[in-house]
Image (cartoon, coloured by chain):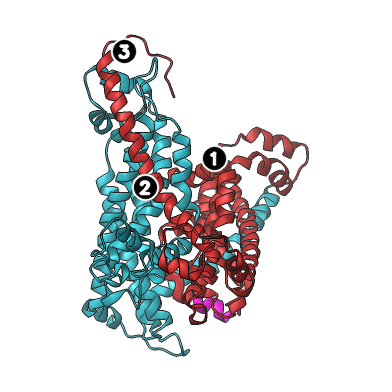
Chain colours: A red, B cyan
Amino acid sequence: MPSQRGGPAVDSPGGRLGSEGRVLNVFSHGVLLLWGLMVTLPLLWAVMSAFKTDKEIFTSPWALPTSLHFDAWGRAWSQAHMSQYFLNSVIVVAGSLFGTMLLGSMAAYVLARFDFPGNRFVYFLFVGGMSFPIILALVPLFFVMKNMQLLNTYPGLILVYIAYSLPFTIFFLSGFFKTLPSSVAEAAMIDGASHTRTFFQVMLPMAKPGLISVGIFNFLGQWNQYLLPTVLNVGDEDKKLLPQGLVALAVSQGYKGDWSGLFAGLVIAMLPVLAAYIVFQRQVQAGLTAGALK
Amino acid sequence: MQHGKYRFIAGFLALPLAIYGVFVISPFVQAIYYSFTDWTGLSPDFEMVGFQNYQRLWDDEVFWKSVGHNVLLLLVLPLVTLGLGLFFAFMLNVGGRRRKNAAIAGVRGSSVYKVVYFFPQVLSIAIVALLFQFAYNPNSGALNSFLQAIGLDSVQPDWLGDPQLALWCVMAVMIWCNVGFYVVLFSAGMSSIPKDFYEAALLDGANRVQTFFRITLPLLWDTVQTGWVYMGIMALDAFAVIQIMTVGPGGPDYSTEVLAYYLYTKAFRDGQAGYATTLGVALLIVTMIFAGIVMKLGRRERLEY
């Protein structure tokens, strides 16, 4: 972005900087393009392979498919249960995202805007969860779930996803609620609204930008979650979530040999997220990086 | 009024606290306790064995191998990923053709680059790991056939099957995944640095490399440090890539074994839940040492602008 206050500062070094700038420009475009290729080529390779026959995949991995074969897509979608895995992921993520946002914003609101004994303790109890490795809790968690009959169930996974998303959600949103002006909330209270009503009808709408950022962050995290379902969702073949189902597909002996089907499955799993990302890229980048900056 | 306030607070906190307590706090506390038992995880009864698990840990060769790999990841991943991220972000923001009235400028199309670089970040790590497992396949994978195509028929490594190479292959994938995130993050930071700083420095005869080390990096230091912690936590985990990409338990000859995956196999394959939680406690300690070091090293004067 060009600065408006150039003045004498730019004019004097003149020619020297100009030529340096041109060389630099060629160099930087070259380097940037190279990395761009390194990022996109593996993805394009997967898409291309999904349209090939198995023989083509083996004999000429880099050649374009001789003709477009769509049959692998059908095989992956129905026979390999990709449609089922997809649906499972949608159910679990829809439930846990809703729960995370609702419970997270409720707790964050109370912790950010009300004074009560133990406030700081509860806050740090939640926020402390961000710094512990999940894998340490995994073994006991497995047995907690087992005892509660929640192992290998949708509600179980949803509850666990919510629980492990709360630390960051509360951390981020309580910071956000603190910055909101208190005059609006006070006005609503004077008009006779209850605390609960003030929260849902006044404060939540005002916190929308923060909710969207943390919502995107949680959506991607939960949709892409691999470790938790790998350990806590191992019962029914049909109940696997998308990433888990894909990996199972790749290892399963019965499926060995259907390479194009595997690539098609991979692309099916990739496309929705990539498409959503391209449409909402500004929000996604802002949402994810906001997570690192706060 | 006061009464209503406390009822409201309790009502809003009860459910989140209950869920968090049952599924996060209680397992963490139990984990510490189980690490002192000989629990298999299969039967309900077990005994306290004191520090026996920790003793065993000390003598466990695979454990030390995993710690070594985790430390290697901890050193290499942040250094390369953040380095590339800084380099590309600087190119995007400063590498452009000089325009009228501006000492420095971003390259044309920098937002397109950022969109593309960020791609891998939104994909599930499981998908990425699978994709690269195919690419590394020695017989039909993209990499070896690429080497063949450019005339390197004799160089056909068995990437993930070679104990010397496997861990480096895994690291390359983790770097591939994360660079874009840091390009976007650092780029946002760089664009908020006032342009006059660069103008003044260039006028004083500094070149671009000097402006990077004297202006950009110091002003961005806080963000770099946050990125370092993030990358470090990722390096300590690495569960998915190891489990999906490498063959056998922890790669050929344990060459890619890391703590997280070793814990998983001990608990859910070998039926040694007690010992597995001991490994978890070790991981926690490594994490805390890492965080402590970063905090200590990272402390410097804050620059205001």
| Of marks 2 and 1, the one in the foreground | 1
Looking at the rendering, which quadrant does residue B75 occupy? bottom left
The subunit carrying tag 3 is A
Q: What residue sits right under mark 2 in the picture?
A: B227
> What is the x, y in percent for residue A153?
62, 75
Name the residue tied to disc 1.
A282
Q: Which residues are magenta?
A: A142-149
Q: Chain of mark 2?
A: B
Left or right of residue A21: residue A245: right
Q: Residue B220 or A178: which is nearer the viewer?
A: B220
x%, y% of residue B129? 42, 64
* Callout 1: SS: helix
Q: Residues within 10 Å of mark 1 (few under 14, many from 20)?
A: few
Q: Which residue is mark 3?
A: A9
Q: Is residue A96 visible?
A: yes
In the rendered image, the vertical position of residue A105 relative to residue A9, given as above or below: below
Residue A14 location (% of width, % of height): 28, 13
- Residue B294 is tagged as none
Amino acid type of disc 1? Arg
Marked residue nearer the N-terminal end (3 or 1): 3
Q: Around disc 3, counting alpha carbons within 10 Å, would you say few (fewer than 14), some (14 to 19), or many (20 or more)?
A: some
- Asked whether residue A143 is drawn in magenta, I would say yes
Place residue B96 in its image quadrant. Answer: top left
Q: Is A99 above or below relative to B217?
A: below
- Name the chief secondary structure element in magenta: helix
Against A277, is B215 above or below? above
Q: Whole-percent x and y of residue A56?
A: 46, 66
Q: Nearer the viewer, residue B142 or A274?
A: B142
Dot 2, crowdedness within 10 Å: few (<14), some or many (≥20)?
A: many
Are marks 2 and 1 in one subunit? no
